Amino acid sequence: MKYYLIVNPISGRGHGERSIPEIEAQFKAANLDYEIRRTEYSGHAMELARQANGFDVIIAAGGDGTVNEVLNGILEADHQNGSQPAMAVIPVGRGNDFAYSMGIPASIPEACQCITANHRRKVDTGRVYGENFPNGRYFGNGVGVGFDAVVGFESLKMKLLTGFASYIVAALKTTLLYFDAPKLRLVTPEGEHNGRYLMVSIMNGIRMGGGFYMAPEGNPTDNHFDLCVVNQVKRRELLPLVNKFTKGSQKGDPAVTFLHTHQLEIHAVDGTIPAHADGETVCEKGSSIRIELIPQKLEMVYQPGLRN
């Protein structure tokens, strides 16, 4: 077994670089045959994963952005003899939502032990088409539209905070910036929905923003997206609703609807669409996006029984 370790040294405000000695010590103790590369610029992890040949497992050590790049590199590569490597993650970023949703332990030693145990499963992925990605972009965890996307944009501006704290502060700020919901049209094979929606979360995984449980029952192996749709609410109702998402207790709230689908188009009838996929900006003021599920597309190394 050959392992290709791609580390983003600036993930988690430098946690990526600081984690390397511990990761290498774990790998050497387990006698893993591995090669390590540090990323040097945005998009580099995707290039490294796309160009990696002859490896059985490609490991992303970083946050959700690094993970998304590695995922896209694996899925877009022209693998020799049709042999696509498995993907593993060591979560050393801010939110680490993909790792959480895929059943990967949060600590470095446990994530490394998960890799050496080498339990695998096929998981679904998604592909989103929008302003920044007219030809499409793969994602593993989810797409956020509306309030959630703006929270992500605002959290990236934080200079002193990291992790879930940065998303909480960004969410508080977003309640002042984004409370007039656009009128959207959601088109799925199961039916059409129209309304003023503050947020639409299209989830393959469970959570976003390091601790907001958009789809508490999400499962990346069930061949459908879990959609969490939030209607326009009064501004005074925003913070209590945000609090429910931190607990995953929003089910049953009159403003929240859950749907299942494998394909979705979102069109702005009035207003615009801010959207992200795994934290990568799809559009800031888009008019429409399209999302499709690709079942069992990726083989993941995970810890059985950890989440789902």
Image (cartoon, rainbow, N blue to C red):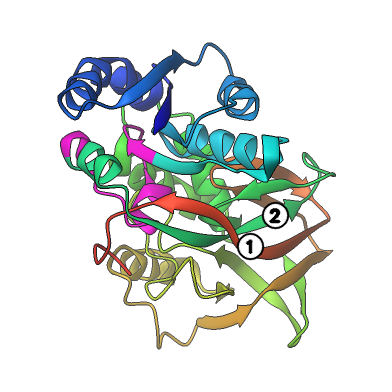
- Numbered-mark total: 2
For the point 19% across and 30% down, the residue is 30
Give whichever of 187, 263 is nearer the camera: 263
Which type of secondary structure does the marked residue at label 2 adopt?
A: strand
Give whichever of 229, 238 is nearer the camera: 229
Question: Is 250 on the left or on the right of 280, as rendered?
Answer: left
Label 1 – label 2 distance at C-alpha: 28 Å
Q: Amino acid at mark 1?
A: Asp
Q: In the rendered image, which residue does mark 1 sit on? A: 180
Give whichever of 145, 74 is nearer the camera: 74
For the point 77% across and 55% down, the residue is 272
Q: Position of residue 37 (x, y in %)?
A: 45, 15
Where on the picture, by quarter, is residue 185?
bottom right
Quadrant assignment for the N terminus: top left
| The residue positioned farthest toward the top in the image shown | 40
10 Å crowding of disc 2: few (<14), some (14-19), many (20+): many
